[in-house]
Amino acid sequence: MDQFDLLVVGSGPAGRRGAIQAAKLGKKVLVIEQGKRVGGVSVHTGTIPSKTLRETALNLSGWRERGFYGRAYRVKQEISADDLRRRLLITLDHEVEVLEHQFARNRVQHIRGKASFVDPQTMQVVKDDGEVVTVSAASILLAVGTKPFRPDYMPFDSKTVLDSDELLDIEQLPRSMVVIGAGVIGIEYATIFSALDTQVTLIDPKSTMLDFIDKEIVEDFIYQLRDRNMKLLLGQKAEKVERQNGKVELTLDNGRRITTDMVLFAAGRMGATDTLNLAAAGLEADNRGRLSVNPETFATKVPHIFAAGDVVGFPSLASTSMEQGRIAARVAVGAIAKEPPKYFPYGIYAVPEISTCGLSEEEVKERHIPYECGIARFRETSRGHIMGLDTGLLKMIFSLKTRRLLGVHIVGEGATELVHIGQAVLNLKGTVEYFVENTFNYPTLAEAYKIAGLDAWNRMGDIKSEL
């Protein structure tokens, strides 16, 4: 039996960052990955593929130039599934190559196979050829990620009724698509295919979407979706889904019927813990396969077993998963782990992008904090005019008492990049004066921060600065 300091199950963002961190501290580390290649869900079916698909769709469709050249403008008139897949494969190969090099450079060992617990400190790994390897470790980090929720009543066939993992392998682009689930994944894919001129209908039993995002941003986002003829059937449930003559027919709970070429079921994901034999380690998952952990150390109820990444639930971001994996690994091997900064950015790679950091206006109201908002629209910036943008919104919320920034919320082109300026000011406890008094490159979309800062400054009163 091989003995390690840290055993990591899964090589996604949490697993690879945790493994490399422990290795840099001089520990003997083994990563177990059941997929054909390292990288986990993030590289092969989640974060990287969906964002690559988005970028390819926007480039080939000419989406970013339509503000100037009209909605009929396209870079490539006939876009095929192969066009989308070609760039995807190049990107994935690069990601895997980088990760394998990182493992080699840091002397992280890794094997392919399906891992399960034998006892709290021992796991067996069944390789593809049937060979069984037994390994043990002083500490174990579970970073197994998630898999799509696939209810029995949904007639999945990988062609006309698919989950989000299967969507990447479609043979041709559908003329029409129904997306069930208005969560982050459903919204991202719905808007990407809408940008490719697929007729998209989005269905969700809830009457609202993205409830953790500032309401004003969501309202602007919904307006943009409806403006380009996406159908949003919120507060409605698909009670029956049937395949008929190469099409799919859906019957909603209000009796409405919809016929479409393809259905994407994206109503949630499950922690990929069902094959781990958690009971042998003294652990159990919730009804969605997720593990409960200490939010500061990411230790489970079994002290030497840790969990990080999507398998522990919200926020389920690649960026936060990396930090969770790093912190968990440091704690696991007895190193000091500093708590990460309070505010982290949340990015939704829809079309348009949404990104947010800090408190929403609704949260500020709940805390009874006196506040003021500043808003800038991208069309107010010279860069926005150059890019042909007639949509896009940046909103900042400031405390009236301390004048500090409380939250920044953006919907529009480049939102996931722009948000980091606000994130830095938030974590450094900056005030409205930072945006008013500092110089921003011109012309840039970042100038929207100055416009929004001035908007808030003009409304706040009790001005102490002299401008």
Image (spheres, helix red, strand yellow):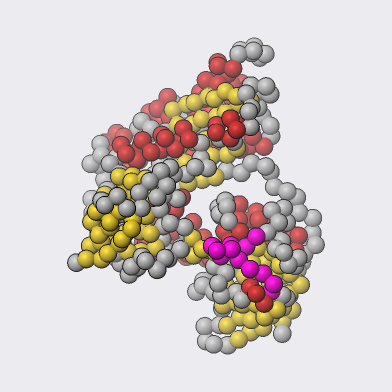
**Where does the image place residue 272, in percent across and percent down from the top left?**
54, 67
73 over 371 or under it: above or below? below
365 over 243 or under it: above or below? above
**Where does the image place residue 87, in percent across and percent down from the top left?**
39, 59
217 over 9 or under it: above or below? above
Q: Residue furthest front?
A: 254
Q: Looking at the image, which residue is at 67% across and 42% down?
A: 342
Between 196 and 234, the one nearer to me in the picture: 234
Specify the principal SS of the magenta part.
Answer: loop
**Where does the image place residue 223, in percent across and percent down from the top left?**
36, 35
The answer, for residue 174, to whether it is visible in the render is no
Q: Looking at the image, which residue is at 42% across and 65% down?
A: 151
- Tell me, yes or no, whether the highlighted magenta stretch contains residue 216: no
Q: On the image, which quarter does residue 23 sit in? A: bottom right
Q: How many marks?
A: 0
Q: On the image, which quarter does residue 262 sit in? A: bottom left
User: Is 209 left or right of 67, judged from the image as shown?
Assistant: right
Which quarter of the rendered picture does the C terminus lie within? top right
**Where does the image place residue 337, in percent across and percent down from the top left?**
76, 54
Which quarter of the rendered picture does the N terminus lie within? bottom right
Q: Looking at the image, which residue is at 38% across and 32% down?
A: 391
- Tell me, yes or no, whether the highlighted magenta stretch contains residue 286: yes
Q: Looking at the image, which residue is at 68% across and 59% down?
A: 293
Between 133 and 59, the one nearer to me in the picture: 133
Magenta region: 281-292
User: Is 234 left or right of 268, judged from the image as shown?
Assistant: left
Between 458 and 291, the one nearer to me in the picture: 291
